[in-house]
Structure formats: structure tokens, C-alpha cells
Amino acid sequence: MADLEKLYKFRFRESDLPQKARIWKTICDVFFSRLIAGDETVLDLACGYGEFINNIAAGRKIGVDLNLDVARFLNPDVEFINSRADQISLPEGAVDVVFSSNFLEHLPSKDALDAVFREVFRVLKPGGRLILMGPNIRYLAGPYWDFYDHYLPLSHLSLEEGLAISGFSVERLVGRFLPYTTRSALPKASLLIAAYLRLPIVWPLLGKQFLVVARKPLGGAEKT
């Protein structure tokens, strides 16, 4: 496995983080706030530098990441857990929402992904939601492999199958959601990002990342 701290420092310049935080604040305020209630417990799986978890409104906020260095970038109201995604030190049914962005493609295999899904299923309350974003291999067959730690090619359709096998019910499946990277030449003004998010009709023009929303059944029983 790659040295995450070195990889993060090479790939993500700290000088870029304020701009990314502004972008994510708009994304959270305009879009994800409609999916997440302000009193819910939210866990950001592989939280990175906290772009999502720092900006989402929630009753309790938890960031999980294997890279210990990211803790210094999280806001004081974010609880940090330094652990693997398949070994989260929380009791069963502890959280309402698990969110993860641009993480699953870093897993080494489908078996590893299944293990993560099992752990997410465990920590979610019955009826809790899993929200996933990530690069869609269907639309990024070339650029997908430009990153040293991309191992697992996934599309929104393959994820739908994997989630169903793991006992989740998929409620929303969007093949084209956000552009692939914030380093593109696309405008990054908050008003333009907000307008884009409010117009799903334009997502197929620029979107290269999937958005998947799945739910743990109220009964809570995982399929085998």
C-alpha cells in the first residue's frame, strides 16, 4: 500500500485546500443538506482533508481515515477515528449517514470493497443511508488510471450490484454527477456551482463522477 501521507502531500497542495473547501461548502449547502438532516450523526469514510465533513451541517460529525496527518485539517467539531474503512471502532447502529467520496477506487479488490460494505452496514442504524461519490470508469476509461493508487474500476451500475449483494437498497443512481476534478478549467464561482447543482439536466454534459444513495433496510438484516 502506498504511503498515504506522502501521496496526499504530492497530490494535494495545501495552498489549494481553501478553494476546495469553498467549493465543498457550496456543494454541501446546496445539495447534500437536502439529503442529510441537521441533527443526524454523519460519518465521512476516508475523509481526507475534511472538505465534506467540515462543511456539512450535522448533529454529530465523524471523520475516518487511515492517514493520521489529516486530523490537523478537521474542524474542532469533527471526531477523528484513525482506522481502516473495514475496522471502524464504533458500535453497531451508531450513525445515520455514511458518506464517502473518491475512496472506493483505492481499494485493492472487490473482496476488500465487500468488507467495507459489511462494516458500513454494521455501523449504520436501520434505515440509515450510504452516500457514495467517485470517478465513473464508464466515462473515464483513460484518466481513471492516471493516479498511482487507483486499483478498482467501478461504474454506477457495478456499484448498484455490489450494494444489493451486501443487503442495501439503492434509492438513487446517477451515472454523471460532478466533474472529475476541481483542477479543471471549469468555473469555480459559488454561484455557478450552485446553479449547476440545481440543474440536473446539465449534469450529463460535464459529470464524470457517479452519485449513489443506498439505504440499510429497517429490519437491518444483511444478505449473505
Image (tube, rainbow, N blue to C red):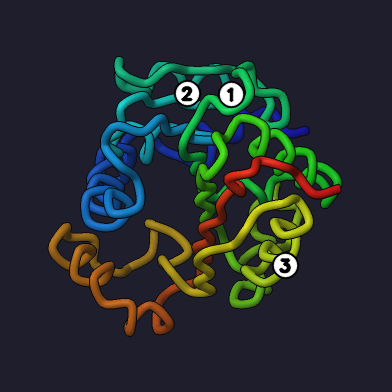
Q: Is residue 156 left or right of residue 62?
A: right
Residue at coordinates 13% horizontally, 63% vertically from top-left?
191
Query: On screen, 159 above or below 9?
Result: below
Q: Secondary structure at mark 2?
A: helix
Q: Position of residue 188 (x, y in %)?
A: 23, 60
- Identify the amino acid type marked 1: Asn
Residue 70: assigned label: 2
Query: On screen, 205 above or below 98?
Result: below
> Do we see residue 209 in this rendering?
no
According to the picture, the residue beneath numbered tag 3 turns out to be 158
Are the two marked residues, 2 and 1, in contact with CB atoms closer than 8 angstroms? yes
Residue 175: assigned label: none
Residue at coordinates 66% horizontally, 68% vertically from top-left?
155
| Badge 3 or badge 2: first in the primary sequence | 2
Q: Is residue 153 left or right of residue 217?
A: right
Q: Position of residue 112 (x, y in %)?
A: 81, 42
Front in this rendered view, residue 117 or 102: 117
Q: Secondary structure at mark 3?
A: helix
Foreground mark, 3 or 1? Answer: 3
| Badge 3 or badge 1: first in the primary sequence | 1
- Spatial separation of the CA atoms under disc 2 and disc 1: 6 Å
Residue 67: assigned label: 1
